[in-house]
Amino acid sequence: MLRPDVETLWRFNQMDHDLRPTDLGVGLGSHDLGVATHTADLYQAGMFPRVVFTGANAPTTVERFPRGEAVHYREHAIDLGVPADTILLEPRAKNTTENIEFTRSVLAEHGLTDEIRSVTLISRPYQQRRSYAICRKKWPEVDVICSSLPLELDAYVASIGDARKVIDMLVGDTQRLWTYPANDWAIEQHIPADVIAAYESLVHAGYTSRLVSA
């Protein structure tokens, strides 16, 4: 009975942007190594000439990536053929706001700020809309495209290996679409009624481990 609600949130949280070349790819740290895989794929397809991997650790990633999300992402991308000298590392960010702010700082440290006019944000599929809203707020002067490894819901759950974890995080990301603007951390976005209803249904069913205090 909950499957339609999960699918509603899954579809809404993806931006369906058309890919085009940008000045920079930013791989947002998480538990999902597919972010680094997709970043490498896009680099090799000529979608951007330079990459920043950003992320320290969260409770959901410290066991899988003990040296930090960005460090493991970088190593994985290099293994997939991305030249090491095209990758910048941002190893301190512990949330998406810090991902954006600290990426900007790394670019400034390398004298690259003026070269970046467009960015491809690479994230988990259900993190796209939240990441877009935060980037638009914290980095308004760049054109932003969102992208993720192109997997359908069932394939994505299989790749993570934990359906409850995926649903919990999907519900949490959806909640952040209105709690973050309320804290001035992201731009406002229209949330359709069916998305609100699906979110409330899943919260009622107990998928609440990733919710934040309003």
Image (tube, rainbow, N blue to C red):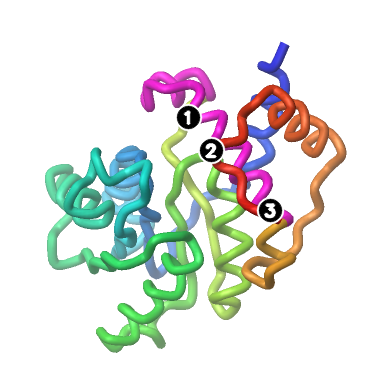
Q: Residues within 10 Å of mark 3 (few under 14, many from 20)?
A: many
Secondary structure beneath label 1 = helix
Quadrant of residue 105 in the image? Answer: bottom left
Residue on which disc 3 sits:
177
Label 1–label 2 contact, CB within 8 A: yes
* Mark 3 vs 1, N-terminal side: 1
- Direction top: furthest residue: 1
Which percent across, then down, holds residue 102? Answer: 38, 74
- Direction right: furthest residue: 193
* Mark 3 vs 2, N-terminal side: 2
Q: Which of the two residues, 45 or 10, is positioned nearer the viewer here?
A: 10
Q: Is residue 70 left or right of residue 84?
A: right
Residue on which disc 2 sits:
169
Q: CA distance from mark 3 to mark 1?
A: 19 Å
| Magenta extent | 153-178
Q: Is residue 155 above or below residue 11?
A: above
Q: Is residue 139 above or below residue 123?
A: below
Which percent across, then down, holds residue 46? Answer: 32, 55
Q: CA distance from mark 1 to mark 2?
A: 6 Å
Residue on which disc 1 sits:
165
Which percent across, then down, holds residue 106? Answer: 31, 78
Label 3–label 1 contact, CB within 8 A: no
Determine if the magenta segment contains residue 7.
Answer: no
The type of residue carrying mark 1 is Lys
Quadrant of residue 192 in the image? Answer: top right
Secondary structure beneath label 3 = helix
